[in-house]
Image (cartoon, grey):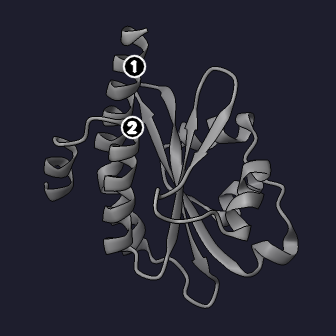
Amino acid sequence: AQFYESLLSCLTLQDILNTAFHAISEHVRSSSAVLFLLDENSVELHRPRDLAADDIQRLFQDWFVRPLAVDISLSPRVCSLENMLQMGLQGSPGVLKTISAAAVPLSRFGQAVGFILIYRTSDLPLSAAELSAVSAISAGLGRAIQNVQAAVKQAF
């Protein structure tokens, strides 16, 4: 409920994303998160405004091609790193073995919006309880993103 109340004051996509990143950091300690949003032809990686891209985030842009991003976004459940590899993720084995990662889908009524990728070092695996907390906000987050995107389209 607190997350949804926070969304009410968000006027821009970046405000929504920063609110989501803040909520994620509170529920999944020592983690990083990026959000992949889909448009008609591409996948855009978004990260917290106040953080510079780390080396792993730079790799993510190449790893999550549009067909894979759509599949993850439409998944009915959180995708573990193993799930994503089975779906076709092709990342550097040297990097993959050093991280624990999961993707929380953002879809609405069968329309792929994107997904939240949460990751941290492999010595501290992501727990089911942590991912469940993030999954609980995913429906409202997906809706808020779609609403602000629709408002931007109408303005043009």
Q: Residue at x 18, y 51 (%)?
A: 6
Q: Is residue 60 left or right of residue 115?
A: right
Q: Is residue 138 left or right of residue 68?
A: left
Residue 96, picture quadrant: bottom right
Q: Residue at x 37, y 54 (%)?
A: 18
Q: Is residue 95 left or right of residue 137?
A: right
* In this view, 24 is above or below 37: below
Mark 1: which secondary structure? helix
In which quadrant is the C terminus drawn?
top left
Q: Give the residue at mark 2.
A: 13
Mark 2: which secondary structure? helix
C-alpha separation, residue under disc 2 versus residue under disc 1: 10 Å
The answer to whether marks 2 and 1 mark residues whose Cβ atoms lie closer than 8 Å is yes
What percent of the width, then of the height, locates residue 56?
A: 71, 67
* In this view, 47 is above or below 153: below
Give residue 58's mark: none
Q: Amino acid at mark 2?
A: Leu
Q: Residue furthest bottom?
A: 123
Q: Is residue 40 left or right of residue 35?
A: right
Q: Residue at x 63, y 63 (%)?
A: 53
What percent of the width, then of the height, locates residue 41?
A: 69, 23
Q: Give the residue at mark 1.
A: 152
Q: Amino acid at mark 1?
A: Val
What percent of the width, then of the height, locates residue 133?
A: 32, 64
